[in-house]
Amino acid sequence: LQDKPQSTVEELAQFLAQVDSETLQFSRFTEKTGYDTPDRLLSVYAKTIAGKKERDLTMQEKSVALNFAKKFTDLPSDIRAPLIANYMMAYKNKNGDFSSGDGWKYRGRGILQLTGRRNYQVIGKLIGVDLENNPDIVGTNMNVALATGLAFWNAVVAPRIKKQRDCVNTEMIPGIIKGSLGEVEIRRKKYLTWVKFVRSYISQRGAKRTSEKFKNAKN
């Protein structure tokens, strides 16, 4: 990293910030999908519930969506989580319908919460592991969890970052950011923390290498 351009430093910091957020500070590698309040569920899936994806919801649509969300969040957590995943992720990323169970089967796992049958297929091929038929391994095997996150970032996120030439503005990171403005702000703060860490690490490594070269030259 010592000789890498500033844009690489910023991208690494964004990557670490997103991993930090997706894994709840590196403590969770399988998504629970057990949203326990209607507001929390709507912050992520309001447009899915209302069937509107291309525009903001009207007040009436939000009200209808809120009442519908309550039907999920009033259920016990062990029942609620699979139902939410199967309903909200039906037909997305090559998932089947609600009854297929694909939403829960291919829920978020790994350091970047790989989600959806298509992503399990594509990323599995990239890392040489059959993830479609063995999805749980993404959340239980740390080597696979890391490999899927790196592969997803390099295949999906990095090319878009390069195209838009912006990896500083967290809200612009494609293929990752979802949820409310509050969630985006949390991730933005994490990015600022991580970019300081990365710069400090590079600086310290550079100083160490300079010191080692000086000692070797004296000897």
Image (cartoon, rainbow, N blue to C red):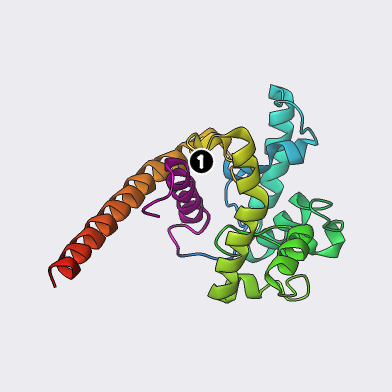
Answer whether residue 24 is magenta in the image.
yes
User: How many marks do you count on the picture?
Assistant: 1
Label 1 sits on a secondary structure element that is: helix
Left or right: where 104 falls relative to 158: right
What kind of secondary structure does the magenta stretch mostly adopt? helix
Residue 66 position within the rendered picture, expressed as x and y whole percent measured from the top left: 67, 37
Place residue 86 in its image quadrant.
Answer: bottom right
Depicted 164 relative to depicted 122: above or below: above
Answer whether residue 100 is magenta in the image.
no
Q: Which residues are magenta?
A: 1-26
Residue 149 position within the rendered picture, expressed as x and y whole percent measured from the top left: 59, 61
Residue furthest to the left: 218
Which residue appears at 42% of the width and 47% of the height? Answer: 9
Which residue appears at 71% of the width and 66% of the height? Answer: 126
> What residue is shown with label 1?
183
83, 107: nearer the viewer: 107
Left or right: where 89 falls relative to 193: right
Depicted 117 relative to depicted 128: above or below: above
Place residue 130 in its image quadrant.
Answer: bottom right
Residue 175 visible at all: no
Residue 197 position within the rendered picture, expressed as x and y whole percent measured from the top left: 32, 51
72, 180: nearer the viewer: 180
38, 2: nearer the viewer: 2
Residue 105 position within the rendered picture, expressed as x and y whole percent measured from the top left: 74, 67
